[in-house]
Amino acid sequence: MEPLPPQMTKRERWELKQRERAAQRQGQTRQQTTRRFLPWTVAIIAVAVLIGWWLRSGSTGGGIGTSDLQPDDWVRGNPDAAVTLMEYADFQCPACAAYAPLVKQLGDEYGDRVKIVMRHFPLRQHGNAVPASQAAEAAGRQGKFWEMHDLLYERQDAWKDSRTPLELFGTYAAELQLDAAKFQADYADPAVRAKIDAHQQSGTALQISGTPSFFVNGRAIDYPRSLEEFKQYLDAALANAPVTATSTTALVHQHANLAIVLNGKPVDLSADKYQSTKEKELDTAVHLHDEEGMVVHTHRAGVTLNDFLKSLSMDLTPDCFTLDARNRLCNADGKTVKLFVDGRANDQYGDYVIADLNRILISYGAEGKPALQRQLDAVPDTACIYSKTCPERGEPPTEECVGGLGTGCE
């Protein structure tokens, strides 16, 4: 897109962007409408049938086939195995550390039948994740990637908050009997960082937003709750190998925090009229439920803020915010509509695509910076519990499953 002329007004910039997005989204409208009206009769499908559906369906987000493996991918197990378990991981992620022993055990139990591939996906909130990936890559150049991989997870608590993680990584390198000078040089090699960035870009292209993210023969799988659930996916893939991954619409299960403050008063989104239930499903792709008013659940990639708001009879533009289809609050008399995402002003308004772990504030009024900051500070960060990226905060409340086929609520 060409740079926008500086003399354009905010409204003109928004309208230009909206026209451009409309062309891109036009082809998706029919698919979105179809998904919203999927029949509820599939709700009683058993887990065994879900595995069969998973095998017959394509992969999430375009998929990763075994032919997509790169020469420099790290493989544990038989490189020629018919079944591939691929993980996008962040060394500083507590959930990844919790899964690491299970993944290693799978490798031991399945032996030559399965190959395990790890790709880097350092999350922005984890300051030492990239350095840890660099340490693993540097160790890999001396044939000890997996050994360093295992050490980093086993000792995550020791280095995750360190201001000098490289010093600790150096002691791990010595423990693995690596050449210290080569380890330091490889750690700082720009090619190592470029590989990590390439992994992250490939994950982003697959619409991965959290870790760990697992794929079996190119098909995304939900977080297995036990070693046995992992084995069900691998056994099913082995029984049907070889399998070719095909493309399907990207299905996700993501969560974001949201607050709406109008003239200094928060809107209570836990009210019944805003909540989705099995008896009153407002939208299969995006909704609130379980009487929780500040955690938005999304089940399809590309869902926008207005997709969500319109399901609640609301609407957001640069000029106005509409509440309950009739209460229209527009820019006037010093009062303005404002959107903040992760603490920063955002000019996409209703076209903003909701991402996992977002903290979103919609505000209307004439508040100054101190009042706005208080509103921003009041937006919680509880979505990570539901998205399983911060297990150290405890278990999420039990969710009433709301959604159609492919949303995890079959």
Image (cartoon, helix red, strand yellow):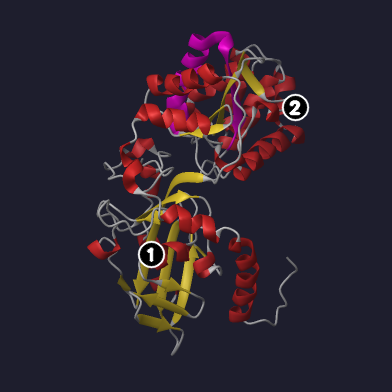
Q: Which residues are magenta?
A: 94-121
Residue 175 position in % (x across, y down): 59, 13
Q: Residue drawn at (56%, 70%), measured in percent from left and top?
A: 347
Residue 277 visible at all: yes
Q: CA–CA distance between discs 2 and 1? A: 54 Å
Magenta stretch: residue 224 in it?
A: no
Q: Nearer the viewer, residue 154 or 74?
A: 74
The mark that comes first in sequence, 2 or 1, is 2
Instruction: Please give the name of the residue rendered at 43% of the width and 72% of the height, measured from the top-left corner.
Output: 315
Q: Main secondary structure of the magenta part?
A: helix
| Closer to the eye: label 2 or 1 | 1
Is residue 402 visible to us here?
Answer: no
Q: Is residue 185 left or right of residue 306?
A: right
In the rendered view of the protein, which quadrant contains the N terminus? bottom right
Q: Would you name the residue on which mark 2 appears?
A: 185
Horizontal relation, residue 64 to residue 295: left or right: right
Q: Is residue 287 above or below residue 314?
A: above
